[in-house]
Amino acid sequence: MKGARNFVLRLLLIALVLLVWEAAVRLFEVPQFILPAPTNVFIAFYRGFASALYLDHIWVTISETLLGFVLGTALAFLLGTVIALSRPVEYFLYPFVVMFQAMPKVALAPLIIVWFGLGLTSKVVNAALVAFFPLMVNTIVGLRSAEEDKVNLMRSLAASKAQIFWMLQLPNAMPYIFAGLEIAMIFALIGAIVAEFVGAQSGLGMLIQSMNFTMDVAGQFSVLLLLSLLGLLLNGLVTGVRRRVLFWDASTKFSDEAAKKEAV
Amino acid sequence: MSKTYGGRREGVIALSDIDCTIADGEFLSIVGPSGCGKSTLLKILAGLMPASAGDALLNGTPIDGPRQDIGVVFQSPVLFPWRSVLGNVLLPVDVQRLGREKMTKRALDLLALVGLTGFEQRYPWELSGGMQQRVALVRALIHDPALLLMDEPFGALDAMTREQMNVELQRIWMESRKTVVFITHSTSEAVFLGDRVMVMTPRPGKVGDLFTVDLPRPRALDVMTTEAFGVYVRRIRKSLNAGGGLE
């Protein structure tokens, strides 16, 4: 009962914010190109879909993001695993890793466009680059987090290094890896959008740029709304998989219990 | 057999001249104050670390690395949360490729032996501490090891669960007749379970006295209140004190 009441209150609060926004824009006669009223944003949102304009761009951005995510996280997992398991590799790669990690990866976007052109490839590469580090770092930390007792248990059974990896280190690292994947997914979206800003023929980032030139601010707001929905969807994809794989992990269990409690 | 930690010159001597023969099927309890090298001794026996001098022999062959005929129960249950109870018990089977089909029956029998029937598909976090340690015990027995090493396995349990586990361990041991090396810091637990009790003295860890416990089996918890039991406990305490173990 209490949960249901809170849910209604939550919806009312959102409605209130939108109402105040709408009223303020109308009352103070704020120009459309500074801040559009919510109604105008929703109209732009509807028009974008009605004319099928958005669908093409959404598809482009989703493919860039997902391809970049897969490419970046696959490489990050491989490199992270090699670094976690081999001290010499870690020692010699460390300077490169630290330098790249400290650098804001989106700053590479102009270069990436020069190297890989205005098409899909440059966006995928940029998304992969940005998605790479969170997963690599988490893979390393996760693989190294196996407790000494558990390693000793495996060793006492005369387990091989490969068995210790597959049966202990990897499953044990999964909570870290999924935390990394969640960040990587959102980062991949950022990477794709930034690369589209710098130079692209299609995609939601390009759409925002071109709307900016024509001062279609309501349109920009509608794309922003679209992007946050997209972010939620992509994030939900990862958390959905995590819940299935990490049913045993305490943090997953607690968040599920919390969600259940909230639902009640 | 000896074990030195650290540098060659000023290393810490953890174990010095440990010389002891354990009979086949014997239950040997080892008591000693903390820091007497009990756990080091167990790690050497498990093949997890090499001895600095001398050898540990199992059935005549030196233990020079982890081997498949030893089962270990640690202080904490060390269960993998992503494996069910049955999955955890079958871990040695997976590692040593003994074939799950063949061994599942044995796993279920052993789980029944410790009273965990019906919990096979549960996960470790759903079990109490005592139940978790029972799973660990079954896991150590599943591959039918020649030697069972136990490092204060019930130390983290409450007193009542602990006594219950002692009775169960005795029953399982009497049925399986494994050779057991049981490390504890509880003298009464050592006497209750052991055929012999080895007292270790600290810094460096040495074999102090060896007591043969001549109490009939199966021993019930009542035995702890008998005069004979008390005599053993007192003698072992005295031996521990002599070694500077207890103040």
Image (cartoon, coloured by chain):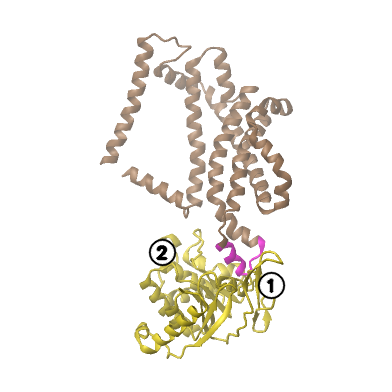
Chain colours: A brown, B yellow
Is disc 2 placed on a helix, strand or loop?
A: loop
Give coordinates of residue A63: x percent, y percent.
60, 34
Asked whether, in this view, residue B17 is left or right of residue A15, the answer is: right
Q: Quick check: B122 above or below A100?
A: below
Q: Nearer the viewer, residue B206 or A46?
A: B206
Asked whether, in this view, residue A189 is left or right of residue A42, the answer is: right
Q: Which residues are magenta?
A: A149-161
Q: Nearer the viewer, residue A110 or B43?
A: B43
Task: Check if mark 2's residue and mark 1's residue have beta carbons within 8 Å.
Answer: no
How many other residues sit within 10 Å of disc 1, few (<14), some (14-19) or many (≥20)?
A: some
- Quadrant where the image shows the N terminus of chain A: top left
From the image, tell me which residue sits under label 1. B52
Q: Which mark is residue B127?
A: 2
Would you say residue A252 is visible in this rendering?
yes
Q: Residue at x 43, y 51 (%)?
A: A253
Q: In which chain is the residue bearing label 2?
A: B
Q: Which picture quadrant has residue A93?
A: top right
Q: Residue at x 42, y 16 (%)?
A: A40
Give coordinates of residue A193: x percent, y percent.
59, 27
Q: Residue at x 58, y 70 (%)?
A: B93
Q: In which chain is the residue bearing label 1?
A: B
Give coordinates of residue A28: x percent, y percent.
37, 9
Is disc 1 placed on a helix, strand or loop?
A: loop
Can residue A151 be found in the magenta stretch?
Answer: yes
- Quadrant where the image shows the C terminus of chain A: top left
Amino acid on which disc 2 is placed: Leu
Give coordinates of residue B94: x percent, y percent.
59, 67
Can residue A166 be found in the magenta stretch?
Answer: no
Would you say residue A201 is visible in this rendering?
no
Amino acid on which disc 1 is placed: Ser
Q: Which picture quadrant has residue B24?
A: bottom right
Label 2 and label 1: CA atoms lie apart by: 40 Å
